[in-house]
Amino acid sequence: MDFRLGERELTLKEEIRKFAEAELPPDWRRSTLIDGECRDFEFEIAISRKLAQRGWLVMSWPEQYGGRGASLWEQTVYEMEVAYWGIPGAWMGISGTQWVGPCLMMFGTKEQMGKYLPLIASGEKDGVWCTCYSEPNAGSDFANLQTRAVRDGDNYIVDGQKVWTSAAHRARWCWLAARTDPNAAKKHHAISIFIVDMKSPGVTVNPILNYYGRHHFNEVFFDNVRVPAHNLVGEENKGWYLLMQALAFERRSTAPMTYGHFRRVLEQLAKYANQTEYEGQPLSQNPVVRTKLAGLAIDLEVLKMFAYQIAWRISQGQIPVYESSRNKVMSDEVMRRVAVTGAELLGVYSQVDPDSEWAKLGGAIQGAYLGFPGQAIAAGTAEIEKSVIARFGLGLPKSY
């Protein structure tokens, strides 16, 4: 495996740097990945549109669907760099670009691909998606979901409740998992995937403010919502495999995103340690501080190698299985370690809101510290991911 970047990747990095410098205001600040979106939706859409026009937003997609046929290797470099520069719009429609689109290419009909993929690739508001998976009683035990879709002629009638749905208040479309056979012998064999128009009668979105006062999550209620039967993705009652593939796509993307963002944060921490004195010398001269910062640098390098390895495997025609779960576990751990080390170095400044004049590092440590518990749950807890690694990576028997 050769992970050295070629001329194409190095040129792409430079183009993204120039784009960030040209398009982002000088005082641009972005706290953490966990915010998930820019506070100014119109600005985010404008940037997303420009990314799409350059062919970056879905660069590894075929040209006929708005991509430019780039390799996943290039896409991984792109994801790292836009996260490093904090470019809004790149993650605005992450559900669509990272897993809905790729899953539609694998399981969707020609009509579905022809309609939805260009919308996602456009970077416009009509290309924003949300993912409705979690329910009040279905989190890690995802097969326990209770939202139902009952066939009624040319439609399905959907009833149920979803929770912790990111960006539902901004989404035009929903990627919905629902139960279509209440009498199935196994819960996994009764789930189907649907595309739902968020403007459909009966869809209600209620905000959930997270513990640092931001609106990113939502409750979504479906009350006799009519979904056209042609919006079923794949086969009825066979959505479980599709879901596992979608989650693998999602988990893959966590490593380059986390690496890019926290590489920038680590650089800021190192600069802070160089410029801040304690007991007559810079913090960076303290051997404990140096060891902690060096450890974070090593962690980030490992995470980068994980991201590159998956890109390389896919470029060789191989299908990563446990590697996506490994990426997710390492990404969550890197975020936690950066947050804890940053809080130790900044002290009370790590608790200051990003909008405060006293905020250090643009509030990145506060955002990471408050955000990592939730991030460790999203897309699969460490316990779930380690079970996947044990079974499919190490060949160990199922433990539950």
Image: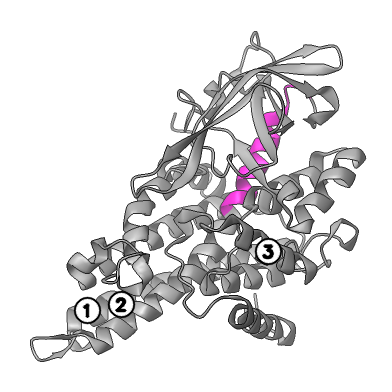
Q: What amino acid type should be assigned to the residue bearing mark 1? A: Val
Q: Are marks 2 and 1 in contact (CB under 8 Å)?
A: yes
Q: Main secondary structure of the magenta part?
A: helix
Range of magenta residues? 236-251
Image vertical order of residue 26 relative to residue 381, above or below = below
Alpha-carbon distance for marks 3 and 2?
36 Å
**Which of 113/311 is in front?**
113
> Element at badge 2?
helix
Is residue 370 found left or right of 206 in the rendered image?
left
Q: Secondary structure at mark 3?
A: helix
In this view, the residue in front, 20 or 389, is: 20
Q: Is residue 250 magenta?
A: yes
Q: Distance from label 2 to label 1 (Cα)? A: 6 Å
Crowd around label 1: few <14 · some 14–19 · many ≥20 (10 Å): some
Q: How many other residues sit within 10 Å of disc 3, few (<14), some (14-19) or many (≥20)?
A: some
Percent of width and height locating residue 273: 26, 83
Q: Which residue is mark 2?
A: 293
Name the amino acid, label 3. Ala
Type of amino acid at the residue the image marks with label 2: Leu
Q: Which residue is mark 1?
A: 289
Magenta stretch containing residue 120, yes or no?
no
* Secondary structure under the numbered disc 1 in the rendered image: helix
Q: Which residue is mark 3?
A: 46
For the point 22% across and 73% down, which residue is it?
345
Question: The C terminus is located in which quarter?
Answer: top left
Disc 1, disc 3: CB below 8 Å?
no
